[in-house]
Image (spheres, rainbow, N blue to C red):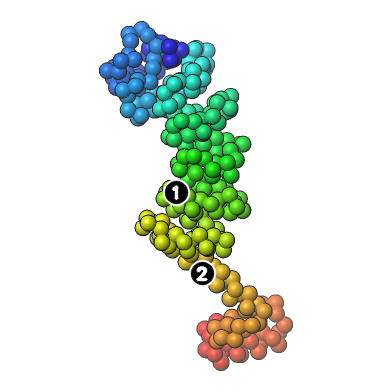
């Protein structure tokens, strides 16, 4: 059997209104046997499975639930043959509830169902010990590889170019687009050759993301080079002259230098003078 508590126990532990909604949606499934175990019906849509999983887990967290067979339900359902049933339960586990099953959930990431693999990688990524991002970037499922880019970008950690650069050449367009967005946000010069290649990508969305990334990278490094020249006094343009005079006129500079700089700014008609 695929669960460890009865419909009568569910009726007792679940608020009546919510319980009625769930039961009415599951009544037509072949798994609904009066007095038998609760199962996440094979004919039920994912939303119904998710609703039932969420409801049962909420009740299992109560004092009354912890003293019943509900406490074993999640562990049993995570070993169900059906991937969509395992995903429905996994997606509603809290961090502390996931930890005892971590080794099992890690196997889902390399399992036979992409949706379950993405769910497992996402849930494990929110724990105190996330999965190795370099390993996720080589996962066979495009959804997991996309998630690897998103999680690394959201982490705020520096680096990542070495194991994420190959994703700009990924066979999946969604992965290429995610990688292009990441390298644009990181204004990475190392990604420029691959981003230029993506300007000829067959997918318009990828071409656009690559062009946007190249624009951001070019602007950032042009500005950086410009300010490096300003600070070294190598830029002879009128704009640069104003910028250097503003630096010389800033508070804290020697009085004579500030007066001369302010006078020069006034001569140039700069409002700040």
Q: Name the quarter where the N terminus is drawn.
A: top left
Disc ID at residue 219 = 2
Query: Can see residue 162?
Result: yes
Task: Identify which residue is drawn at 51% across, 16% down.
Answer: 72
Q: Is residue 91 toward the left or the right of residue 165 in the image? A: left
Where is residue 199, by image quadrant?
bottom left
Q: Position of residue 65 (x, y in %)?
A: 49, 16
Q: Is residue 98 above or below residue 245?
A: above
Q: Name the quarter where the C terminus is drawn.
A: bottom right
Q: Is residue 235 toward the left or the right of residue 203 in the image? A: right
Tell me the CA gap for discs 2 and 1. 29 Å
2 vs 1, front mark: 1
Q: In front: 142, or 77?
A: 142
What element does badge 2 sit on? helix
Mark 1: few, some, or many residues within 10 Å (few <14, many ≥20)? few
Q: Position of residue 108 (x, y in %)?
A: 50, 30
Discs 2, 1 touching: Cβ within 8 Å: no
Mark 2: few, some, or many residues within 10 Å (few <14, many ≥20)? few
Q: In front: 8, or 48?
A: 48
Q: Is residue 91 above or below residue 235?
A: above
Task: Identify which residue is drawn at 47% across, 50% down.
Answer: 170
Disc ID at residue 257 = none
Q: Position of residue 217 (x, y in %)?
A: 52, 65
Residue, far bottom: 267
Task: Identify which residue is drawn at 58% across, 27% down.
Answer: 103
Q: Which residue position is annotated with label 1?
A: 171
Task: Identify which residue is drawn at 49% across, 18% down.
Answer: 76
Upstream in the sequence, badge 2 or badge 1?
Answer: 1
What element does badge 1 sit on? loop
Query: Can see residue 126?
Result: no
């Amino acid at each position: 059997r695929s669960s460890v508590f009865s419909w009568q126990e569910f009726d007792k532990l679940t608020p009546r209104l919510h319980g009625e909604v769930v039961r009415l949606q599951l009544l037509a499934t072949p798994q609904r046997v009066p007095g038998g175990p609760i199962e996440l019906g094979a004919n039920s849509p994912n939303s119904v499975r998710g609703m039932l999983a969420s409801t049962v887990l909420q009740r299992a967290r109560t004092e009354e639930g912890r003293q019943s067979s509900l406490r074993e339900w999640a562990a049993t359902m995570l070993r169900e043959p059906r991937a969509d049933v395992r995903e429905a339960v996994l997606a509603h586990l809290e961090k502390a509830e996931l930890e005892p099953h971590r080794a099992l959930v890690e196997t889902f990431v390399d399992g036979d169902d992409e949706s379950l693999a993405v769910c497992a990688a996402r849930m494990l990524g929110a724990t105190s010990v996330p999965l190795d991002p370099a390993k996720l970037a080589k996962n066979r499922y495009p959804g997991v590889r996309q998630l690897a880019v998103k999680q690394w970008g959201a982490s705020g950690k520096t680096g990542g170019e070495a194991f994420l650069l190959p994703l700009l050449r990924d066979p999946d367009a969604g992965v290429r687009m995610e990688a292009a967005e990441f390298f644009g946000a990181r204004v990475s010069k190392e990604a420029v050759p691959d981003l230029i290649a993506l300007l000829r990508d067959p997918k318009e969305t990828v071409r656009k993301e690559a062009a946007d990334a190249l624009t951001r990278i070019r602007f950032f490094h042009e500005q950086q080079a410009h300010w490096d020249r300003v600070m070294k006094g190598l830029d002879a343009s009128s704009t640069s002259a104003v910028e250097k005079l503003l630096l010389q006129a800033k508070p804290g500079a020697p009085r004579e230098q500030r007066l001369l700089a302010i006078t020069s700014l006034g001569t140039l008609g700069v409002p700040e003078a």
